[in-house]
């Protein structure tokens, strides 16, 4: 298990998470300033367009592969943007502390593109546009679970007439979230309109990548002491 010892390690500047927050926010502002036809054209051009599962190779063509990456910075609604920004802030900063900014940025971009690819193929139709950083944020959630399996997260629970703040194991909350993503791939809110497979595949990508890196991170942490 990766153990962070902040009292004995040099603090590294965490700039990757704020940069991603800024990019997503600025792109949302640009979209908001465009008229409807221009906004739709931009989303169609830079979003990740799905494909029939038997024709998945079309997603790797020069005019399509870029959309798997650029779609990460585009959001079609304010609620989608705000939700992703909150999750990015909660899970991005501690994950960046463990990985460092460059690794986090690489994991976010490459993992998010792979998650978009999985979602584009799973839709099995050629006319859906995938937007948003949800797949990439899910990558960071998976990485967080691998790096901090014993961490605890604060949750506000409605108890009768009162709201109670409690701390629960992050592993329980994240695994419940992952189970919900799996269930929603068959039926759930916005069924057919949300790329649930991007969330689920992103989570698995981040979990596997962080598990593979954990030994290296432990060695680097010992050298910095």
Image: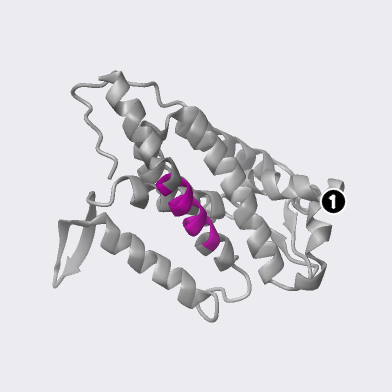
Indicate left or right for 95 with 2 as reference: right
Residue at the (15%, 57%) spot, across then down: 166
Q: Is residue 153 above or below residue 218?
A: below
The residue most toward the bottom is 187
Residue at the (34%, 45%) spot, across then down: 147
Q: Is residue 212 above or below residue 119?
A: above
**Depth check, front residue: 79 or 185:** 185
Residue at the (29%, 46%) spot, across then down: 148
SS category of the residue bearing label 1: loop
Please tell me whether residue 162 belongs to the stretch shown in magenta.
no
**Depth check, front residue: 17 or 179:** 179
Please tell me whether residue 210 belongs to the stretch shown in magenta.
yes
- Give the residues drawn in magenta, as a range: 201-211
User: The N terminus is located in which quarter?
Assistant: top left
Q: Position of residue 132 (x, y in %)?
A: 60, 52
Q: Look at the image and tell me whether residue 76 can be seen.
A: no
Q: Look at the image and tell me whether residue 190 can be seen.
A: yes
Q: Is residue 105 above or below residue 63?
A: above
Residue picked out by circle 1? 61
Q: Position of residue 20 (x, y in %)?
A: 53, 36
User: The C terminus is located in which quarter?
Assistant: top left
Quarter of the image holding residue 118?
bottom right
Q: Position of residue 153 (x, y in %)?
A: 24, 52
Indicate left or right for 9 with 87 as reference: left
- Sort mark 1 into few (<14), some (14-19) or many (20+) by Cα contacts within 10 Å: few
**Chief secondary structure of the magenta span?**
helix
The colour scheme used to paint the residues is: one colour
> How many numbered discs sit on the rendered protein?
1
Quarter of the image holding residue 201?
bottom right
Residue at the (37%, 39%) spot, across then down: 215
């Amino acid at each position: 298990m990766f153990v962070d010892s902040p009292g004995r390690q040099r603090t590294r500047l965490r700039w990757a998470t704020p940069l991603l927050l800024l990019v997503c926010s600025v792109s949302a502002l640009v979209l908001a300033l465009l008229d409807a036809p221009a906004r739709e054209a931009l989303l169609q051009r830079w979003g990740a367009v799905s494909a029939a599962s038997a024709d998945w190779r079309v997603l790797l063509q020069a005019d399509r592969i870029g959309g798997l990456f650029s779609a990460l910075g585009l959001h079609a609604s304010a609620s989608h943007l705000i939700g992703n920004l909150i999750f990015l802030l909660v899970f991005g900063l501690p994950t960046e502390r463990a990985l460092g900014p460059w690794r986090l940025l690489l994991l976010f971009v490459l993992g998010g593109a792979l998650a978009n690819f999985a979602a584009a193929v799973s839709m099995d139709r050629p006319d859906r546009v995938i937007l948003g950083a949800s797949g990439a944020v899910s990558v960071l959630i998976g990485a967080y679970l691998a790096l901090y399996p014993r961490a605890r997260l604060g949750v506000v629970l409605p108890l009768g007439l009162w709201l109670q703040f409690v701390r629960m194991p992050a592993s329980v909350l994240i695994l419940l979230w992952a189970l919900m993503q799996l269930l929603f791939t068959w039926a759930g809110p916005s069924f057919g309109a949300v790329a649930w497979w991007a969330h689920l595949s992103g989570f698995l990508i981040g979990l596997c990548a962080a598990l593979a890196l954990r030994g290296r991170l432990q060695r680097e942490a010992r050298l910095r002491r």
